[in-house]
Image (tube, rainbow, N blue to C red):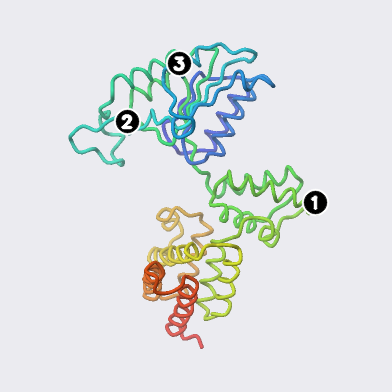
Amino acid sequence: MARTRKQNTQADFNNLKASIKRGDIERVYVLTGEETFLIENIVESLTAELIEPGAVNLDRLVCYGQGRGGKVSLEQIMTEVRTPPFLSKRKLVIVRESNWLSAGQSARKTGKAAASDEDADDTDNPTEPINRTDALIDLFDRVPDSASLVMIENKVDRRLKKLIQAVERNGVLISLERATPNVLQQWIEAQCRRHSITIDRDTAESLIDRCEESMQIIEQELTKIFLFCEATKCRHLTREMIDAVSLPDLHGSIFDLTDALSSGRIVEALRLTDTLISQKQPIQLILFMLSRHFRQLICAAELNKRDALVSALRIPPFVADRLIRQAGRINIDHLERLYASCFETDVSIKSGRISDRLALETLLVESAEMIRQGSGHR
């Protein structure tokens, strides 16, 4: 059942959840990937399936490999997994961020130049410390049926073939990356239906964008929104309601700000900036977001195709569409000059030549004027 690729996070997650629900429990789980919400969901499912209510402190142990309470040792983990559970079906041992399956800890490069990540699958195994590797393999092979070992790792180096084979031999290796915008939208709609609430596509996309496509953050925001809906008897979510209850839409505000600049509406641009500042958004963050947005607009102007832009910038399709539309209204030479102006403004602020707010507002006025002159706005 071990996974060796990251092609379908949702399918892998659903399959693993279904197997846990059936009681098909593995002795070893290695969980990695950016979507911590799904990883924690699996840990909760294992806890619910294996640990008796009231026995969590007895039969579930959480160890940290880095930074919290010191580093756990392999010997400690071996002792814990071989200790029978007191009241539950199995002893559940969870190890977080051990780094034992990454090249930095379980592998060392030889004096020869290391192969690039792109060619990693085609290279021989990196040189491995024999003691660490053999100890890990021994640990995986000797986890008894009375225990389940869950390792949650930031990175797993698949070139450590003997370790990967040991995991596959004894359990599951799964990489849970962030879901696609379409999957996130379906998930949001399903969550809303459970509360007898409807949500339109634009509102769902806005929530996804302002939460940086993170299921963990989206879930937190939905919890607030559902409490608001319960109190107000609301049964349909709108963009205005999301704006009032959820996180500020910094990305959307930057789009609106650039729309105002491209139309020569400098008063509107300054009003949007003032709103962002009143929301406690740091001016340096606003400047960074504006600079990144101009860079993305340059890419949109050059590529001018949704799929190419999604692939190049790793952004949702609806963001790519809006970038392409907006880039079509501004000359690419002006976009490049605006991008350079953001850098110059940042240098002026950091060198103390001008205050951050005055620098940002000056940049906006000069940008609007540059665009106006180039596009013929009066």
- The mark that comes first in sequence, 1 or 2, is 2
Q: Label 3 vs label 2: CA separation?
A: 24 Å
Q: Is residue 169 left or right of residue 189?
A: left
Amino acid type at mark 3:
Met
Indicate the position of residue 243 as horizontal and vertical percent values: 66, 60
Q: Position of residue 361 (x, y in %)?
A: 50, 76
Q: Quadrant of residue 51?
A: top right
Q: Say whether disc 3 or disc 2 marks the residue closer to the N-terminus.
A: 3
Mark 3–mark 1 distance (CA, rounded to whole Å): 50 Å
Q: Regarding mark 1 in the picture, which secondary structure is present there?
A: helix
Q: What type is the residue that disc 1 sits on? A: Ala
Name, please, the residue furthest toward the bottom.
378
Q: Secondary structure at mark 3?
A: helix
Q: Which residue is mark 3?
A: 78
Instruction: Say whether disc 3 or disc 1 marks the residue closer to the N-terminus.
Output: 3
Residue at x 27% of width, y 41% of height = 116
Label 1 near label 3: C-beta < 8 Å?
no
Question: In the image, is residue 328 above or below residue 70?
Answer: below
Badge count: 3
Mark number displayed over residue 231: 1
In this rendering, position of residue 161 left or right of residue 78:
left
Say which residue label 2 marks: 159
Q: Secondary structure at mark 2?
A: loop
- Mark 3 burial class by Cα count in 10 Å: few <14, some 14-19, many 20+: some
Q: Position of residue 331 (x, y in %)?
A: 41, 76
Q: Amino acid at mark 2?
A: Arg
